Image (tube, grey):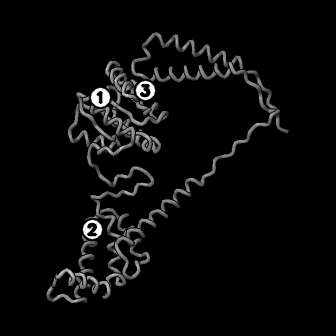
Amino acid sequence: MANLIVADENKGRRDLLAINLGREGFNVTRTSTLRQTEGTALATMPEVLVMDAEWRSADALDTAQRLMADPEFSFKSRIVLLSRDTSNEMLVSAAKAGIHEVLGKPLNMNILITQLWKHAKKQFVPPPANVNTHTSQGFFDVNLSLKDPTWAMPMLQNMLNPEVINPQFVDEILARLAENEIEIEGIDSSNLGSLLKTVFGQLLESQVDNDENPQSKTVQENIANKNVPKLGTSLEEILQDEADELREEILTKMEEILSEEIPEITALEDYAKIKVDPEFINLVKYTSQSLEELLWEIGIPGRLNDPSLSIWVEDSLKSVQDIIKSIPDIPIDDEE
């Protein structure tokens, strides 16, 4: 059963949507404020967070952006925004905030349920809009897309080396042209080699001129200084070499992160342990849950004016006093 959070400050609309989604097999949690939504989402990591776009006290896009900044949440969860505004500007803003889909109001429940199941099963759903692919979203973001040609520049640099475009390489091209009965007048092996180098060189120069990022130039220079491919290296082998280098780099950085040791915790000896009444533990747990709910309620704008909160505060205070009275004074041995 997929876990799902419905975030909407309108109680009637929130309850109606939660009931309908519950009937479709979702395990639904309801939240009435964006602050509560953010805390609940980070604590439970639901498969899908369904969030209304209209809030009086906060901005749904800011909340979504903060949630997606959490690596674990961005990996495990998806955000679906329900909005009356489906303009291009709104879709671009939602995509930049990390929202996975924007559904327009009034809602079509059949479409909503279908899309939620897709998100819950981590199936592909097109983003609200195409945004800048060079916006880093994490430590291991490689910033590659099919519409970005810069990934091919290192291979072109390698191919400009004399050991790649050599007479044997040019003769093979002429032989294949001859097999296809393609004749180019006035072009011999030496002229064709110069032509290929000129074409590839112009491609690189035009890319560097259009690239305003000095870091990309440095990366390209570093790659160009590496060992060039061997004679007769195919494009598939060049791609494999680049993929192997990237894999080694990722494995090295992952090993650095995973090798961090967990701090050791010294367990108490048996003679230093104190028996605790199970009822006392239940009291502490109940009081902590009550205080947590009380603090959430206090955080809701205008909620402090509710007279029922004073009774809640008195009950919580009494529970805390009972806990304090139940804890005996433990003498501390002075270290000599």
User: Which residue is found at the position 56% from the left and 57% from the top?
Assistant: 256
Residue 322 or residue 160, whichever sits in front: 160
Which amino acid lies under the numbered mark 1 shown in the image of this protein?
Answer: Glu
- What whole-number distance in Å separates the C-alpha atoms at marks 1 and 3? 19 Å
Q: Please say if 105 is above or below 201.
A: above
On the image, which quarter does residue 281 sit in?
top right
For discs 1 and 3, the disc positioned in front in the rendered view = 3
Mark 1 and mark 3 lie on one chain; the one further toward the N terminus is 3
Q: Is residue 87 left or right of residue 264?
A: left
Res 199 quadrant in image = bottom left
The tag on residue 29 is 3
Which amino acid type is shown beneath numbered disc 2?
Gln
**Crowd band around label 3 with a 10 angstrom C-alpha radius: few (<14), some (14–19), many (20+):** some
Q: Image height check: is 77 above or below 4?
A: below
Q: Which residue is mark 1?
A: 54
Q: Residue furthest right?
A: 336
The answer to whether the residue labelled 2 contacts the one labelled 1, judged by CB atoms less than 8 Å apart, is no
Indicate the secondary structure of the residue bearing disc 1. Answer: loop
Q: Position of residue 42 (x, y in %)?
A: 47, 35
Local secondary structure at mark 3: strand
Quadrant into which the C terminus falls:
top right
Residue 148 image point, x, y percent: 29, 60
Q: Which mark is residue 207?
A: 2
User: What amino acid type should be assigned to the residue bearing mark 3?
Assistant: Thr
Of 104 and 300, which appears nearest the observer? 104
